[in-house]
Image (cartoon, rainbow, N blue to C red):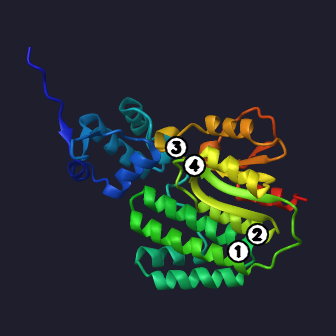
Amino acid sequence: MARVKKELFTIRQVIELTGVSEFTLRGWENRYNAFKPQRTKTGRRQYTLSDLQKARLLHELVEKNHRISDIAELGVKELEKMVSKGPDDSAPASLPRRPSKYVQTLINHSALFAWDQVQSLLRKRRQDLSLIDYVLEFILPTIQQMNSLVAAGHFSVAQEHILSALIKEQLILSKQNSKRKKASRSKFVLTTPEGDMHDMGLVISSALCSYHGVQTLFLGPSTPKKDLCETALRFGASHILLASTVSEQEGAKTSLFSYVNFLDRNLPQNISLLLAGRNTFGFSVSLQRQCKVLTSMEELIENLKALP
């Protein structure tokens, strides 16, 4: 019996047939593992009929206020059952509902590619607010709004990258210009595991450390575990702040468990670990040293305040 050829669709066909934008489709795939398309020899994505159906269902459910992070990895049958139940009145809308006027103004400028106005507003708020308020009341809500807009397909990847770069620039300036409190004896090394390229949380954390008088060594993203151990020893670190936002399936070279256990076996016990980021949610491990999972920037601030 002849085999029936499986019907495959290009990304352009999926966009045309579902109404989901390319930015949204790629975001659902890369950030939330919603799809695992096949690839041609030239690297072009090929989606199945099931992928096409799933994209339609996800689009409909997001419109009904379901969070993409909650539903992205569900199967078609499960999604169909959810669609038949109607809107999720208990779930928050996919976009933050009430951003401050400053955050909304910044987002509006970014949507129009008005980068001079974005830079000006970022600088003005930095000058008007303390670093803590700048981070908690302005920067973090802006990042939340930006991420939601990217996931919903209303912001392009280019807009996300430019706005992120401008935010990082102001945070670096905040670190340089902040009036530091009494110097702490603690010394922090900040990085992400190898393969994790997301460093926004590190940049914010570095600025907060400096504000609290903590000496930092900012390694940036994606540091191999052996290099991190050697650097921490040479620096005389008291803490390693490790921000993990992606799993092995999303790009990390090893599991967080493997990475952290390597650090635990190869570092002196007096070096504490602080873990943060999306990939640390629910993470638990028994180590030879003090290890704490931070769930918010507020929690980091409280830990910094308590340092000797």
C-alpha separation, residue under disc 3 versus residue under disc 4: 9 Å
- Identify the residue position indicated by label 2 in the image: 210
**Residue 234 quadrant:** bottom right
Q: Tag 4: residue type? A: Thr
Residue at (35, 42) in percent of width and height: 57
Please name the residue that numbered disc 4 is placed on: 245
Could you tell which of marks 2 and 4 lies nearer the N-terminus? Answer: 2
Instruction: Return the residue at label 3.
Output: 252
Q: Using the image, determine if residue 43 lies above or below residue 221.
A: above
Q: Nearer the viewer, residue 20 or 34?
A: 34
Q: CA distance from mark 3 to mark 1?
A: 29 Å
The relative height of residue 27 versus residue 217 in the rendered view (above or below) is above
Looking at marks 3 and 4 on the same chain, the residue that comes earlier in the sequence is marked by: 4
In contact (CB < 8 Å): disc 3 and disc 2: no
User: Marks 4 and 3: in contact by CB < 8 Å?
Assistant: no
Q: Disc 1 marks which residue?
A: 175
Image position, residue 98 (x, y; %): 58, 66
Q: Give SS at disc 1.
A: helix
Q: Is residue 15 visible?
A: yes
Q: Is residue 31 left or right of residue 181?
A: left
Viewer can see residue 97: no
Dot 4, crowdedness within 10 Å: few (<14), some or many (≥20)? many
Q: CA distance from mark 1 to mark 4?
A: 23 Å
Q: Residues within 10 Å of mark 3 (few under 14, many from 20)?
A: many
Circles 2 and 1, Cβ within 8 Å, touching? The answer is yes
Q: Nearer the viewer, residue 118 or 284?
A: 284
Q: Nearer the viewer, mark 2 or mark 4?
A: 2
Q: Secondary structure at mark 3?
A: loop
- The mark that comes first in sequence, 3 or 1, is 1
| Residue 212 image point, x, y percent | 81, 68
